Image (cartoon, rainbow, N blue to C red):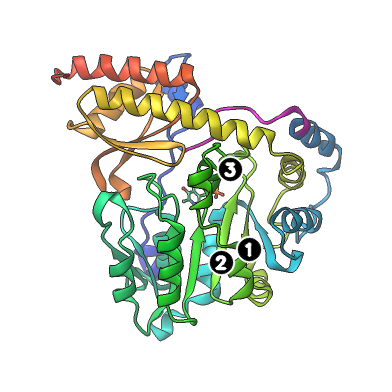
Amino acid sequence: MIDLINPNVRELMPYKAGRPVEEIQRLYNIEKVIKLASNENPYPVPQYVADAISGELANIHAYPCSDSYYLRERIARYNGVKPGNVVVGSGSVELIRMIAKTFLNPGRGDKVLTSDKTFVMYKIAAVEEGGNRAIVEIPLGADYRYDLDRMVDAVDKQTKIIFIANPNNPTGTLLSKKELQAFIDKIPGDVIIVLDNAYQEYVTAAGDEVAASDYFDGIETAVARKNIIVLRTFSKIYALAGLRVGYAIAHEEVISYLGRVKAPFNVTRLAQVAALASLQDDEFKNKSARLNAVNRERLFQRLSRLGLEVVPSKANFILFFPRTDTNDLNERLLKEGVIIRPLHGFGFPDGIRVTVGTQEENDFFMEKLEKVFKEMNRGLN
Ligand SMILES: Cc1ncc(COP(=O)(O)O)c(C=O)c1O
């Protein structure tokens, strides 16, 4: 069998997703289970989005619009660009894979450059196309942030794509507008820079004007230059993770090449109408971002009070180091009905990432965490 497998696929470590609530309920025979493992928005979508989805049910016998025509138009208007600058994907994960497929030529020794301890799909997409040789990961720098200077130094003739998550997952750390603009200026024009802004709104819509004005959304640059691609998603702030829809903004020529590797009908009818309705107004987005900021701060303080190292986050999740066996801690929390994310796959074997939930969910998580720490005889402060 192994001889039949594409060598790149042999080298691939599969993406390990957070386990679903239903699975834990069944496995441990418990009713109350909360999931704080995949950075989803804990609040349900507004009624007008739910109505758009129900209204579309009558049409699901027919394929969706293959190029998400109306959604692209809406996204373009929302971002002040042309529809030709937008391609819609089945989540931004599909777009990451499309970018790798479009720009990487492994026969030429092309490589993807990114940080270590970042979103694992960058590595997966690179290895899919070119095996382990196709990925270069620069260690995170001080304060759990991307080390942009070392990344600039690492660029060589084989570098074809650079992926940057801002804020970064799983650290929640941010790069400033100035830092990113200076970085872009130092990168040759024939290297594609992907700005993955999946958690952008948690910075820009939380009511903090200073933070918002220091955020680099990259849209203007992406439209003007041919080597910048901005990724956005409806999975986080718009609470549509279950429908899978995201988009890329770039120069029209870049978008046209990405379109060549896009699967036909890649975004479902329900996803298209839901995303379109989501852009109707910003109230839900702003409210979600504001609530997240308040609840994140409370969670940060409570974790810090336990004497743990907690990384200050600008996103909707928090990285902390429990100073105990994270597999054991994870198993015990699962039995208590709490799903969090141990980070072995992200290169932090000692770290746990917890998504900021509702206030009630965060209280439940903290109650169970303290209980489990006591069981493990782990000295609390
Ligand atoms: C940095 C980053 N980019 C992209 C994604 C994937 O988002 P989507 O649901 O749009 O595929 C995630 C999901 O966790 C993420 O953390």
Q: Are marks 2 and 1 in contact (CB under 8 Å)?
A: yes
Could you tell me residue 371's position as x and y percent? 27, 14
**Residue 109 left/right relative to 46:** left
- Residue type, mark 1 in image: Ile
Q: Residue at x 50, y 61 (%)?
A: 195
Q: Is residue 300 magenta?
A: no
Of residue 71 and residue 189, the one placed in the foreground of this image is 189
Q: Residue at x 45, y 26 (%)?
A: 295
> Mark 2 packing: few (<14 Cα in 10 Å), some, or many (20+)?
many
> Mark 3 packing: few (<14 Cα in 10 Å), some, or many (20+)?
many
Of residue 359 and residue 161, the one placed in the foreground of this image is 359
Query: Which residue does the numbered mark 1 point to in the structure image?
Result: 249
What separation in Å lies between label 3 and label 2 (alpha carbons)? 18 Å
Q: Examine the rendered structure and indicate whether residue 167 appears above or below residue 107.
A: above
Quadrant location of the C terminus in the rendered image: top left
What separation in Å lies between label 2 and label 1 (alpha carbons)? 6 Å
- Residue type, mark 2 in image: Ile
Badge 3 marks a residue whose secondary structure is: loop
Q: Residue at x 76, y 64 (%)?
A: 83
- The stretch in magenta equals 39-48
Q: Which mark is residue 229?
A: 2
Some atom of ligand 1 lies within 8 Å of the CB belonging to the residue at label 2: no
Q: Examine the rendered structure and indicate whether residue 146 appears above or below residue 344.
A: below
Could you tell me residue 357's position as x and y percent? 48, 27
Query: Which residue does the numbered mark 3 point to in the structure image?
Result: 235
Badge 2 marks a residue whose secondary structure is: strand
- Residue type, mark 3 in image: Ser
